Amino acid sequence: MASRIDLHSNNGFSHWSADVGSVTSYSTALAQMELYEGDADSQNEFTEKLLFWARQIRDEVVPRMVEEGYGLTESEEPEAIEVLKQLAKYEISADMLRTSRIHLALREMNAADAWKNDESRYQSDILLLKWETRFGSLRKLTINIWADGGRMANVAKLRESASESVPKGLFKASWSVLRSAENANTLALKTGDLDFAVGSWWIKPAAACRDGIIDSLDGITADGKLAYAIVLDDTDELESGLDGRLVYRPAPSQLCRTRLMKSLTSRFPVRVLRSYKLFSPLKPLVGLRYDGLYGIKSIGTKLQVRVENPLMVYTFTMKRLEGQESLRTAMRHPTAEERDDWRIYQRYKHRHLVLPSEVDLSKPGQFILPGSAQSSSFNSRRASAFTTIGPLPDDAGDYFAVQKRKQDTQDNLDEDVISPGDVSRPRSMD
């Protein structure tokens, strides 16, 4: 067999370096891949290349069409046409489509009118028709996110039945979580980023608990010494900006908020994650996203007397640490693939509920994660009454407007084009 071809792409369509000959384009490499048909390793390699190309289309080309009004460049278009021709010749299996999601990429290109000429659009339509004739509805080619290695593997929400309810002491919305051997202990009760990249993303907080970046659904991960991570939700974020400034107000019911006070004196940073339910332009479209390490700079207190029982409200002024990937990088997540998996979860989550009796707590790493105990009465007020956006760069208004246009355009595609589920993502970033 010929030497393995490795992909190092500058723009997603050309300039490959390889150990075989002088492969300088997708079309040349794909033509060579025809020689390896039937070999499992070569099919896996080919699938990886299709996955890379699909990501370039969905996360670069189509958004560029939405934001700037053009899709493929003059140099990319001929390469893309040749790739389509090679795809028509190559025997693509359902598993290759399911893994690479190249069919979703082509449908998004068609829907966004990102091709530069009718020939490309025609070739794309022919491919999609060929695959749909062979495999049936392409919307059914979805991955199992609950399988080993999937985003929701070893995570299941508890359900109640007529004969069995959630045990006393556990709040509703509790989860069964099975951690891997390396995460079986209290990984989250450590300082630092724990090797999680900025922009790491999860469908549900329970999955983030499984991976060990947080250890609680209550919003603050802490022990008797320090706070290590916070999840911003609802109206927790009073001020924010791309410059890294953050004013955080935890709900009074979050007893662990006092641990954040110790983080001021210890000067250990905390991990900050944002939920899609947060009232903030920095929130992810869906799911939960890790936005980096923040240090606590100051603490404010105020007695809240306009409620039935007076409460002490704490606010923490925080600053994002230098030397990390930017917030703009983080805000590239969720990617198109991640949004796909979110919709898969929304469509099939009712099939993956478990009874408390079905959870084997004798298994190493298996535990029940209680749902949030914090009261929603304090945070149920309108966000506009509390939330303001702090100092932003001069171009922030244009940036957020582009993100909103990008989201609205994608929403128009979701229902009929790329959605493997029945639930589209939230439509407001305001």
Image: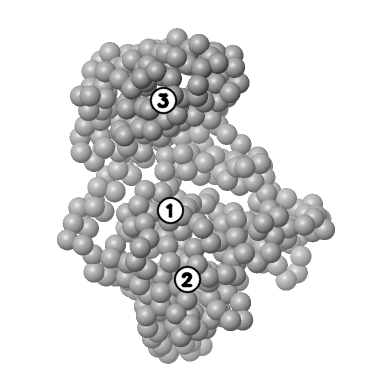
Q: Residues within 10 Å of mark 2 (few under 14, many from 20)?
A: many
Q: Is residue 307 visible?
A: no
Name the side, left or right, on which 417 lies relative to 219: left
Decide which of tag 1 and tag 2 comes sooner along the chain. 1
Q: Secondary structure at mark 1?
A: loop
Q: Quadrant of the C terminus?
A: bottom left
Which residue lies under the disc numbered 1?
199
Which residue is at the front of the view, 36 or 411? 36
Report the residue at 53% width, 81% height from top: 259
Quarter holding residue 237? bottom left
The mark found on residue 18 in the picture is: 3
Decide which of tag 3 and tag 1 comes sooner along the chain. 3
Decide which of tag 2 and tag 3 comes sooner along the chain. 3
Report the residue at 22% width, 58% height from top: 396
Q: CA distance from mark 2 to mark 3?
A: 43 Å
Which residue is at the front of the view, 409 or 400? 400
Name the side, left or right, on which 297 lies relative to 349: left
Q: Is residue 209 visible?
A: yes
Report the residue at 55% width, 25% height from top: 44
Which residue lies under the disc numbered 2?
270
